[in-house]
């Protein structure tokens, strides 16, 4: 399987969870991967080792992508290291859930900056080089919470809904240069962000999923890899839900 052979991908928040799974799946399909992380250097290096141990190419690059300058430095470092960037996956994200009357302003700002501003920062940094090479794939990892909303997540849902708007608007701007921009919207996925949910709540959530189970990180990675491939060259501005049927319509 080498659908991404000779492609260079930048994956933000790639040291764990969905980002890690995407980085590994990209490498399995032949891509060279820039593994971005903010604070988890050891975890990012483990992802790089997992790729290089099986003959792939990867490098860990530290950057807080919610910072405009650091996001630019990430893309510059990837181009300097690997010569180009063909694929950008905006996956960096966080949650600070609470009801709005209990939510602090800082909780809003951190989630918006990490989930939404970071994606804009990275898109802004990479688009010029993609336009010059007349090729690019941008995949934004949003959430079904950005489609249907979720109580206790006004900040998170707003950031993920904003990411959908960013996806559709940017897709229109860059389509003439053979750059596609799509989003993948996971439902419930067992990651560090959901690890604190009690088992009884997780069981109740399964009752609302037609397929009767949570997604795996690999389920999401497969969808992201498809959107990043040449097989998806005629798909842009779309949101693909990977949620077991949780949100339809």
Image (cartoon, rainbow, N blue to C red):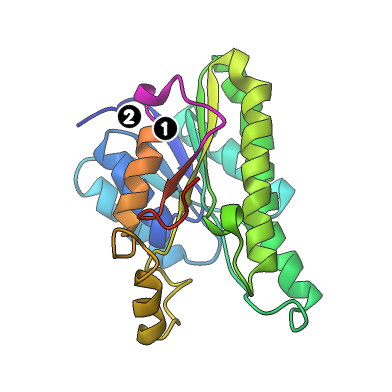
Secondary structure beneath label 1: loop
Label of residue 58 in the image: none
The residue furthest right is 105
- Mark 1 / mark 2, whichever is N-terminal: 2
Query: Which residue occupies 36% across, 63% down?
Result: 209
Query: Which residue occupies 35% across, 23% down?
Result: 231
The residue lying toward the viewer, choosing from 237 and 211, is: 211
Tell me whether the residue at label 1 lies in contact with that at label 2, contact meaning CB atoms closer than 8 angstroms: yes
Magenta highlight range:
229-239
| Figure disc tally | 2
Would you name the residue on which mark 1 appears? 228
User: Does residue 71 appear in the picture of this structure?
Assistant: no
Q: Is the magenta stretch mostly helix, strand or loop?
A: loop
Q: In which quarter of the image is the N terminus?
A: top left
The residue lying toward the viewer, choosing from 171 and 192, is: 171
Q: Where is residue 200 in the image (x, y as percent from the top left)?
A: 37, 86
Would you name the residue on which mark 2 appears? 4
Q: Where is residue 82 in the image (x, y as percent from the top left)?
A: 45, 32
Query: Which residue occupies 41% across, 32% down?
Result: 228
Where 112 sits versus 172, above or below? Answer: below
């Amino acid at each position: 399987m080498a659908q991404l052979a000779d492609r260079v991908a930048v994956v933000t928040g790639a040291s764990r969870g969905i980002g890690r799974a995407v980085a590994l799946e990209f490498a399995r399909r032949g891509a060279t991967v820039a593994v971005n992380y903010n604070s988890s250097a050891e975890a990012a290096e483990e992802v790089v080792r997992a790729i290089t141990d099986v003959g792939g190419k990867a490098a860990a690059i530290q950057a807080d992508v919610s910072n405009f300058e650091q996001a630019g430095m990430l893309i510059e470092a990837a181009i300097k290291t690997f010569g180009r960037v063909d694929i950008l996956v905006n996956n960096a994200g966080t949650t600070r859930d609470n009801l709005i009357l209990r939510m602090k302003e800082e909780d809003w700002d951190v989630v918006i900056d990490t989930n939404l501003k970071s994606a804009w920062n990275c898109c802004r940094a990479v688009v010029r080089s993609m336009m010059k090479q007349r090729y690019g794939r941008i995949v934004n990892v949003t959430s079904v919470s950005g489609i249907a909303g979720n109580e206790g997540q006004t900040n998170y849902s707003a950031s993920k809904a904003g990411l959908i708007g960013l996806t559709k608007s940017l897709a229109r701007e860059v389509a003439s240069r053979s750059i596609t921009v799509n989003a993948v919207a996971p439902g419930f996925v067992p990651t560090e962000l959901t690890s604190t949910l009690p088992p009884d709540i997780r069981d109740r959530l399964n009752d609302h999923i037609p397929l009767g189970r949570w997604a795996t990180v690999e389920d999401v990675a497969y969808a992201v890899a498809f959107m990043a491939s040449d097989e998806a060259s005629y798909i842009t501005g779309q949101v693909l839900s990977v949620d077991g049927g949780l949100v339809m319509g």
